[in-house]
């Protein structure tokens, strides 16, 4: 039987919050508006495939958590609503029946790893300040919607040693009220009134403003910005060329023509990795 996801068009969920606050890597406030009002879903490309992988691996992450803490996690497939904001919803990965806490599962891919914090407490949990903003917004929303005692964000890192790190978030009423208030205002000011929010990119401006008008006169500030844009474009081109030259020089240094091989890494005398290779080069900051 096909699941009914129509509620996602009519209400605001946890994955929408970061976009509403302009903190998402994948969507903007206008994207959320178009989804709710115009039933237009942005093509997220690789992000959609990653979400599918995350859903596939979710049972494994939950099983790992259950064995680690010797608890039973109860799935909750239907959305949860809030009496104060009936146009909010939350879809929870799992409830810990033992202590009324929640878990949220995430799968982290190599190219987005840098934004995750590494501060670990003596009890074994990672500090919630290390959660990337777009995921923290979702956790905060779930906490507000459920009054959970705490939420464990269980993150599976799909590279290296396939680590699973648990970031524990405790209720923060001030933060939760602030974020829910912003989401509430977005719904009332834009979605309910069917007025698009201000565009936040060049492409969105083109989407919203489809009619052309006569030319306008540039003032001094406009001319200064246009000149600066031209200069920056030239600098960017020069920097890009230099960056490509360095990349090519490093990869040549790492190759061995006699064995037709490439070194997996380049390190300094202290053993710190400066460059790694696994289909692509990855450069690390050098500690001076």
Image (tube, helix red, strand yellow):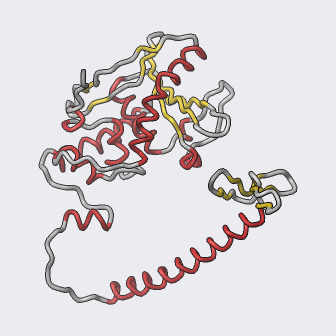
> Residue 250, percent across and down?
73, 66
In the picture, the quarter occupied by the C terminus is: bottom right
Visible residue check, residue 21:
no
Classify residue 246 by image quadrant: bottom right
Taking the spot 20% from the left edge, 63% from the top edge, the residue there is: 208
| Above/below status of 33 relative to 124 | below
| Above/below status of 90 relative to 218 | above
Taking the spot 76% from the left edge, 58% from the top edge, the residue there is: 260
Residue 127 left/right relative to 230? right
Residue 45 left/right relative to 83? right
Taking the spot 60% from the left edge, 33% from the top edge, the residue there is: 126
Visible residue check, residue 144:
yes
> Residue 7, percent across and down?
21, 32
- Name the one closer to the observer, 221 or 4: 4
> Residue 73, percent across and down?
46, 14
> Residue 100, percent across and down?
43, 15
Taking the spot 72% from the left edge, 70% from the top edge, the residue there is: 249
Residue 233 left/right relative to 48? right
């Amino acid at each position: 039987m096909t699941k009914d996801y129509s509620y996602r068009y009519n209400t605001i969920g946890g994955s929408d919050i970061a976009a509403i606050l302009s903190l998402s890597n994948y969507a903007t406030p206008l994207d959320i508006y178009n989804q709710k009002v115009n039933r237009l879903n942005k093509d997220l490309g690789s992000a959609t495939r990653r979400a599918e992988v995350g859903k596939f691996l979710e049972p494994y992450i939950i099983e790992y958590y259950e064995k680690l803490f010797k608890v039973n996690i109860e799935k909750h497939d239907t959305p949860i609503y809030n009496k104060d904001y009936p146009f909010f919803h939350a879809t929870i990965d799992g409830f810990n029946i033992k202590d009324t806490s929640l878990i949220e599962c995430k799968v982290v891919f190599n190219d987005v790893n840098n934004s995750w914090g590494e501060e670990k407490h003596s009890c074994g949990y990672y500090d919630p300040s290390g959660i990337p903003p777009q995921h923290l917004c979702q956790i905060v929303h779930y906490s507000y919607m459920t009054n959970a005692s705490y939420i464990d964000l269980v993150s599976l890192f799909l590279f290296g040693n396939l680590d699973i790190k648990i970031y524990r978030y405790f209720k923060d009423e001030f933060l939760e009220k602030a974020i829910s208030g912003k989401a509430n205002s977005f719904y009332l000011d834009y979605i309910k009134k069917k007025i698009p929010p201000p565009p936040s990119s060049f492409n969105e401006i083109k989407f919203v403003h489809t009619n052309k008008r006569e030319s306008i006169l540039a003032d001094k500030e406009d001319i200064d910005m246009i000149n600066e844009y031209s200069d920056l474009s030239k600098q960017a081109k020069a920097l890009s060329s230099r960056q490509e030259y360095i990349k090519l020089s490093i990869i040549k240094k790492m190759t061995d023509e006699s064995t037709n091989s490439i070194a997996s890494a380049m390190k300094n005398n202290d053993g710190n990795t400066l460059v790694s290779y696994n289909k692509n080069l990855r450069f690390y900051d050098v500690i001076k």
